[in-house]
Image (cartoon, helix red, strand yellow):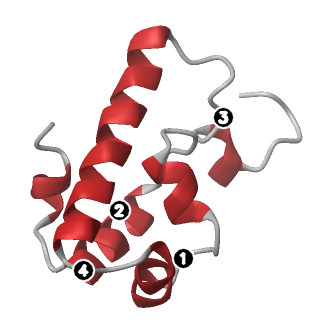
Amino acid sequence: MPLGLPLQNYCLLINDWTKAEKQILIEFGEKVRKIRREKGMTQADLVHEAGVHGNMIGRIERGERAANVLQLFKIAKALGVNIDELFDL
């Protein structure tokens, strides 16, 4: 782990990820978007319900950001699904 980098940010860096890892993020984001739209929610609705940062949902849905475990649970709860449904890619 690079010195000086906060632990919570270490796992979220995507610049060094492999093509396969980036593809997983893209597919995961598409899954979140699909469920959100099926529930009739906007990104703003999901941000509010999940209690996450304002642009996080958009970045997750575009495959630009990996969520941590706590954020995943909050997103799943806000969407009204079990967390394992988010990983059914």
Gap between marks 1 and 3 measured at Cα: 18 Å
Q: Which residue is mark 4?
A: 40
Q: Nearer the viewer, residue 68 or 64?
A: 64
Residue 80 in the image: state x and y as whole percent: 16, 80
Q: Which residue is mark 3?
A: 13
Residue at x 60%, y 41% (from the top left corner) = 12
Q: Nearer the viewer, residue 48 or 66?
A: 48
Q: Which residue is mark 2?
A: 72
Q: Which residue is mark 1?
A: 52
Gap between marks 1 and 2 measured at Cα: 10 Å
Where disc 4 sits, the SS reads loop
Gap between marks 4 and 2 measured at Cα: 19 Å
Mark positioned earlier in the residue sequence (4 or 2): 4
The quadrant in which the C terminus is found is top left
Q: Nearer the viewer, residue 12 or 28?
A: 28
Q: Residues within 10 Å of mark 1 (few under 14, many from 20)?
A: some
Q: Amino acid at mark 4?
A: Gly
Mark positioned earlier in the residue sequence (4 or 1): 4
In the image, residue 65 sits, relative to residue 38, either above or below, namely above
Q: Residues within 10 Å of mark 4 (few under 14, many from 20)?
A: few
Q: Nearer the viewer, residue 57 or 66?
A: 57
Frontmost of labels 4 and 3 is 4
In the image, residue 29 sits, relative to residue 22, either above or below, namely below
The quadrant in which the N terminus is found is top right
